[in-house]
Image (cartoon, grey):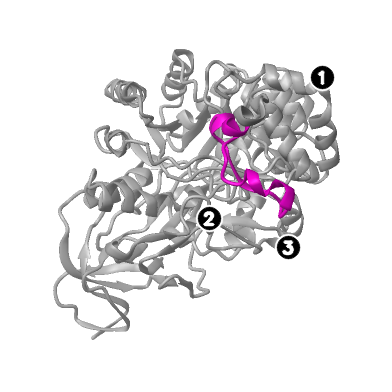
Amino acid sequence: MVEYDLHIKDGVVIDGTRLPRYRADVWIKDGRIAQIGGPAPGTAREVIDAAGKIVAPGFIDVHTHYDAQIRWDPWCTISGWHGVTSVVLGNCGFGFAPCKEDFRERSMLTMTRVEAIPYASMKAGLPWDWETIPEYMDSLDAAPKGVNCLQYMPTASLMTYVMGLEAAKSRPATPEERQEMKRLLHEGMDAGLCGFSIQRMGENSVQSDYDGTPMVTDTMCDADLLNLCEVLAERDEGFVEITHDVGDDAADRAFVEKMATVSKRPIIWNPVFATNDPAVHKSQMAWLDETNERGLRIFGQAASVRSGFVFTAAEWNLYDSAASWNHATQGTREERRAKFADPALRQGLRDEVSPHGLLKKDGIKTTGGPLTMLIVNGVNNQPELMDYLGKSLGQIAEEEGKHVVDVFLDLSLAGDLEVEFMQPRPEARDPTFTAELLSRSRYTFPGVSDGGAHTKFYNGGCFTTDFLLWLARDEKAITLEEAHFRLSALPAHAAGFRDRGVLREGAPADVLVYDLAELAIEPHWIGEIVHDLPAGEWRRVSKARGYKAIIVNGEVTFRDGECTGATPGKLLRGGRG
């Protein structure tokens, strides 16, 4: 008789392959799926009653910034609460390795600005027991983990390590520097990196560095980037993640095609998205279809979650694409207050906003939505400001005869920069278009959670649950079989996970058991504030309801929403493990 570790009894199996669902028992032993269906020759130490519930592969979150958080939160919540069993770290070219000892402080300051990760938490929570990528990978491997992870080479860190920060931002690499970067990428791939990542948004990047200048890879020359692509071609392994400007122009697409041609490896291109103009997503789908038909493996990762931004002027960092706004939102609270009160700077801020409240940057929509549509969500408990609660900035501007920029600045100053502005809910978003983007194209999957980043503004880590309850359960715009393929199998394939993303005998046991009828995000939209970060820092979170069990490598990490404390996650070097 065999003694199994887990017996998931009488569930409805959706295996991630798009095959029709079926009822079956699932038996798990030694971290792997031992048997699906039929009588098993033994008993199990634990039985999970899955009658009436879905049994599916764990979700894979390909775009995260949990590089710091995983060191104090092994389960990478918010994502870990919402069925994610594997994450990819080091997106957009940002990370903490390789990093010389005298650059650690500057590295944390960069992440404070570009990804809005609280500095005090990083200062308290990062062990900094590495310099090189192999040392970093060994440190990550040894750390307790409640999820599996892959790690990119953060290209901005690599360039800075080899060239120095000023040179990396101001000139192309020399032939000698290019050769050294290739050597270090080879070394990192030997240590188990899955490839490399970049953010390429140009000089007016929406996510700038600590000093207000573009990030290193934003202005990285083509030759330096293609130099790294050659490493993947030489090895015939790995992939590239590129975060591009949402302007989505032909030149950007052409260069991504060149990257795919030179690297001969998959490219994950994000974000793709569906708006209420179907031409937007149809253009993206057509390009992905056409390039893949030519043999270029380019996948689109879609921003699909119905979660918005809520922020104060004290720490907001996502208006950086406009120079005056970039300058005004840099610095300490006192420095920001002084800038907001400066008449000359105010005029510059007004000049960079259209009549509709959009930043004047090639017609691109302002991150967080138009200023006119922002809603006053909190007034720092100041009685004299209470009448503004629930009003949009556009409404206040009309009532008071002010420019919308002056409304934003005046309210911020009156509330000591703690007046809270909320992006309006996206109820008007057409689910048909999002479903079309994420079911008709063979090369798209949902994600761009940014998990671990923008922790005080945004809770995109709940995208997995939102995708299921919005498009599959409530709107019935996509089947559960298709949804699980897009949340597990396809991102696993694109990102080089070996043997994960589907339920099959012999595969690692990353498994979800959930009740579709009870599935919920609590609270949805902007979440709630919790003080659970190192150094007493806070973040916004949205928890999950309806997951009976979340299983990683055969061990239950969450049972009915409660963490078990188990840390069975692995660093998947080269996607294996």
Say if mark 3 contacts mark 2, CB within 8 Å: no
Residue 233: x %, y % from top left: 46, 28
Closest to the observer, 291 or 119: 119
Which residue is the site of mark 2?
Answer: 527
Q: Which residue is mark 1?
A: 344
Give the quadrant of residue 213: top right
The secondary element bearing badge 1 is classed as helix
Tag 2: residue type?
Answer: Gly
Percent position of residue 440, x then y: 24, 33
* Measured Cα–Cα span from mark 2 to mark 1: 37 Å
Task: Identify which amino acid the numbered label 3 is placed on.
Answer: Gly
Residues at marks 1 and 3, CA–CA distance in whole angstroms: 37 Å
Tell me the SS state at disc 3: helix
User: Which residue is located at x 25 percent, y 68 percent?
Assistant: 53
Magenta residues, as a range? 369-396
For residue 452, above or below residue 393: below
Residue at image position (53%, 24%) is 245
- What residue is disc 3 on? 536
Q: Residues within 10 Å of mark 2 (few under 14, many from 20)?
A: many
The answer to whether residue 384 is magenta is yes
Figure check: 305 above or below 158: below
Amino acid under disc 1? Ala
Mark 3 Cα-neighbour bin, 10 Å: few <14, some 14–19, many ≥20:
few
